[in-house]
Image: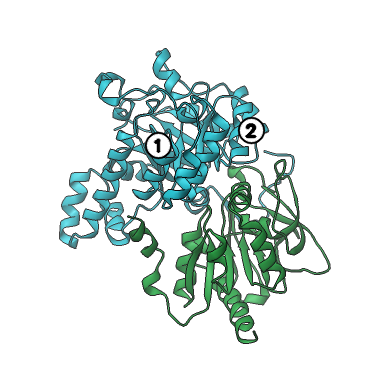
């Protein structure tokens, strides 16, 4: 809480409702959420036009390189980043680790990412996100997975991609898969939706809602392997509401300039002349790993069930 | 792909004769505003460039992140034309970040953050604290009728002081002002666009129509 916070202003007011949780994601749309590991990086991200930051101890590329069990970040680090910036601060809990999520809520982060980038804490259950006042974002590789997370209380979805690689191909696969499955649902007759729900392994009511509205009931961002302005713009053209950039900024040669360039390319995603302009002279992009070269056990996107 | 997305703002539902209203589309929930305005009969377009601003009779600045809108509007030469349009009497309605953009003075801004100005008010960013303090509530706003307005505050700002040129329209029970108007400018701390509350937009479209009729 900041020094200005006060108790809820009226007896009838309500915090932590679905509308309030999903509403923050609505306000992030058209924006770029950047991974940061220090308050200094958070400051650079805010100054470059990030719409929020993800506070981490290690970016996914380093988690990948260093191996071992990846866990929630040190509360001191998260608090230092919250103190540094005025934009929303997100932080990651391990899949299924509801106590890490409780801690993050107590630290007053603005969004909790139940993330496959960290080592899972439960190979069966995800966190019951309805129990929290703080909203959650969760990863998904397809529509069924997205709807299972929403059913558990996720207020925002990000397609997973393959984090820490700088290879955008999995992000492309996942956003195309999700939007493609939504388009299929839209064209179905009512009786076909029952079978679709079974095949998607998702609750019928949510599947029907998607079939009727033609979109997810929550905001859909893209993540995992976005490293250039053109990558970000491509995700937007493929139907993402915004992008997460993890290792792509602070593992590059000129983070300030690259961060600002990705922000501009996300807003002007349909204007190739702007994307060309911001792509000039950015220096080295992160080196990157081709996802095809990763042995299956090292593919983070396969975590989550 | 791009075409599909611009259609999705509801161009099909837009009446060709309605007032031409732009929604600033640099970042934020601009599609929600566009849908609502189109449903109310406005001819809606998204505004990201000076030439797009020149074609509208009114503008909505959506919810989102004010620091991002400020940076992008200055980087792409939109801030100065916006200030001139506001000074020239263009009706503008800002929600949340949009209210911040319209305020003459802001508190708890980041270093170097600027606003377009126009509303004679002092607005504090993130006045309620983190997302855990975001809330929804009912507000009595006599100017919009007897039915209370269901208001959603998302890391919202409040109007800390209202100068002589501006008029408060709504306040929380503790007295803090959360909606103001001044001439053709309207600002709310909360987000009618995400609750299906249409009366603010209707009120704003009335201002746009009046100004268009009276030249």
Q: Front-most of A29 and B68?
A: B68
Neighbour tally class for label 2: few under 14, some 14-19, many 20 plus, Cα within 10 Å: some
Q: Give the colour in which the image draws chain A.
A: cyan
Residue B171 position in % (x across, y down): 71, 63
- Judged left or right of residue A32, residue B189 is right
- Judged left or right of residue A128, residue B178 is right
Which residue is pictured at 41% across the width and 22% down the height? A287
Q: Which mark is residue A43?
A: 2
Disc 1 and disc 2: Cα gap in Å?
21 Å
Residue B190 position in % (x across, y down): 61, 59
Q: Front-most of A101 and A295?
A: A295
Mark 1 element type: loop
Residue A109 shows up from this direction: yes
| Quarter assignment of residue B109 | top right
Residue B56 position in % (x across, y down): 55, 72
Whether label 1 touches label 2, CB < 8 Å: no
Name above or below for residue A8 compared with residue A76: below
Q: In which quarter of the image is the C terminus of chain A?
A: top left
Q: Name the residue under label 1.
A: A223
Which residue is pictured at 64% across the width and 62% down the height? B81
Protein chain holding label 1: A
User: Upstream in the sequence, badge 1 or badge 2?
Assistant: 2
- Judged left or right of residue B80, residue A160 is left
Residue A122 position in % (x across, y down): 35, 25
């Amino acid at each position: 809480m900041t020094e200005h916070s006060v108790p809820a202003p009226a007896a009838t007011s309500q915090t932590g409702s679905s509308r309030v949780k999903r509403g923050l994601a609505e306000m992030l749309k058209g924006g770029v959420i950047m991974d940061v590991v220090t308050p200094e990086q958070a400051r650079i991200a805010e100054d470059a036009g990030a719409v929020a930051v993800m506070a981490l101890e290690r970016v996914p590329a380093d988690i990948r390189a260093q191996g071992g069990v990846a866990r929630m970040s040190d509360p001191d680090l998260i608090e230092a980043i919250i103190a540094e910036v005025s934009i929303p601060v997100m932080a990651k809990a391990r899949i299924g680790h509801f106590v890490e999520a409780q801690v993050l809520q107590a630290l007053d982060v603005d969004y909790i990412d139940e993330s496959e980038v960290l080592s899972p804490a439960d190979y069966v259950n995800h966190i019951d996100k309805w129990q929290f006042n703080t909203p959650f974002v969760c990863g998904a590789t397809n529509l069924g997975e997205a709807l299972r997370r929403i059913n558990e209380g996720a207020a925002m979805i990000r397609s997973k991609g393959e984090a820490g690689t700088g290879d955008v191909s999995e992000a492309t696969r996942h956003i195309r898969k999700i939007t493609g499955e939504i388009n299929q649902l839209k064209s179905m007759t009512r009786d076909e939706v029952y079978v679709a729900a079974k095949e998607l392994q998702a609750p019928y009511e949510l599947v029907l809602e998607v079939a009727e509205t033609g979109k997810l009931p929550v905001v859909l961002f893209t993540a995992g392997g976005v490293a250039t302005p053109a990558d970000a713009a491509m995700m937007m053209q493929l139907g993402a509401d915004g992008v997460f950039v993890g290792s792509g900024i602070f593992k590059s040669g000129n983070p300030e300039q690259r961060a600002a360039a990705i922000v501009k390319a996300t807003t002007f995603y349909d204007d190739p002349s702007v994307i060309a302009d911001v792509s000039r002279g950015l220096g080295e992009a992160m080196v990157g790993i081709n996802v095809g070269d990763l042995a299956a056990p090292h593919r983070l996107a396969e975590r989550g069930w | 792909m791009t075409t599909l997305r611009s259609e999705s703002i509801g161009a099909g539902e837009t009446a060709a004769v309605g007032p031409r209203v732009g929604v600033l589309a640099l970042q934020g929930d601009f599609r929600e505003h566009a849908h609502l305005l189109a449903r109310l009969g406005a001819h809606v377009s998204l505004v990201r460039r000076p030439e797009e601003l020149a074609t509208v009779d009114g503008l909505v600045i959506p919810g989102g992140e004010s620091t991002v809108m400020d940076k992008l509007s200055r980087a792409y030469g939109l801030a100065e034309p916006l200030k001139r349009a506001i000074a020239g009497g263009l009706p503008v309605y800002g929600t949340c970040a949009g209210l911040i953009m319209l305020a003459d003075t802001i508190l708890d801004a980041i270093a170097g953050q600027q606003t377009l100005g126009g509303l004679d008010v002092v607005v504090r960013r993130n006045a309620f604290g983190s997302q855990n303090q975001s809330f929804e509530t009912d507000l009595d706003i006599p100017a919009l009728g007897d039915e209370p307005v269901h208001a959603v505050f998302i890391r919202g700002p409040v109007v800390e002081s209202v100068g002589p040129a501006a008029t408060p329209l709504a306040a929380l029970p503790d007295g803090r002002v959360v909606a103001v108007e001044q001439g053709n400018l309207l600002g709310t701390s909360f987000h009618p666009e995400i609750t299906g509350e249409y009366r603010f937009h209707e009120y704003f479209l009335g201002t746009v129509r009046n100004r268009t009729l009276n030249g």
